Amino acid sequence: MRLLLIEDDMELCRLMETYLSDQGVAVTSVHDGPCGLEAAGAGDFDLVLLDVMLPGFDGFVLLERLRTCSQIPVIMLTARTAHADRIRGLEQGADDYLAKPFAPGELLARIRAVLRRARPTPAPVQILESNGVRLSFATREAWCDGDSLELTSAEFDVLEVLLRNAGRTVTRDEIANALYRREATPFERTLDVHISNLRKKLGVRRTAIRTLRGNGYLFAPA
């Protein structure tokens, strides 16, 4: 596993490099926004750990620019715990968000969870299609009315759960279990953000994803 760490706190970088290397993870660290964007675009990394507060330009700007050319998994790291900041990061394509300070073991668990979603075991059904939306599990590609969709790993997984259960209400707990192997928390906004992102990307097909308040979500077949 090769990770890119974009973080301006040198001491934190050293601590994370030491811990993760002991877990068999190779870590490359850079310390500002421009260098981080260049490294993320040029390097062969499995995942990016991205701090929000960076010199040059911040992590939000870096993530927005990165998503124009890459769908590499990204976990944001920040001391800013406001819900607005978390939602902004997720809306711009982050796969997960971890507030500082954090336990090293939790970070490693989140890294592994994100990579599991990005590298699933082969599914028995290789193509799934409903209401103009088509998914390929072999390549983890998605299309809407024939046009390619640029989805994050988490968005692909949410859409997969909805399409596999097209015409049936899928609870928030079912989606959270598919993404995080746990139930949804009462005030969690992560799922709402992923659903909102999917609707935007589906364009005219956005109404296929319906919210059933108090129950969950339903993908309406054609």
Image (spheres, grey):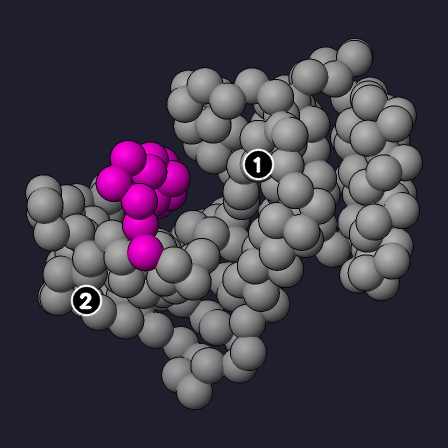
**Local crowd size for mark 1, using a 10 Å CA cut-off: few (<14), some (14–19), many (≥20):** many
Q: Residue at x 40, y 83 (%)?
A: 125
**Local crowd size for mark 2, using a 10 Å CA cut-off: few (<14), some (14–19), many (≥20):** many
Instruction: Determine the residue located farthest toward the bottom in the rendered image.
Output: 124
Q: Residue at x 33, y 35 (%)?
A: 189
Q: Amino acid at mark 1?
A: Leu
Q: CA distance from mark 2 to mark 1?
A: 32 Å
Give the secondary structure at mark 2: loop
Q: Is residue 196 visible?
A: no
Image coordinates of residue 28 in percent, x first then y, are 88, 43
Q: Residue at x 27, y 57 (%)?
A: 173
Q: Nearer the viewer, residue 5 or 98?
A: 98
Image coordinates of residue 76 in percent, x first then y, are 61, 34
> Residue under circle 1?
98
From the viewer's perspective, is residue 70 above or below residue 168?
Answer: above
Give the secondary structure at mark 1: strand
> Residue under circle 2?
166
Q: Nearer the viewer, residue 36 or 139?
A: 36
Q: Residue at x 48, y 73 (%)?
A: 137
From the viewer's perspective, is residue 58 above or below residue 213?
Answer: above
Is 28 displayed left or right of 122 in the figure? right
Instruction: Determine the residue located farthest toward the top in the rendered image.
Output: 56
Image coordinates of residue 89 in percent, x first then y, are 51, 29
N-terminal of the pair, mark 2 or mark 1, is 1
Is 136 displayed left or right of 35 in the figure? left
Q: Amino acid at mark 2?
A: Ala
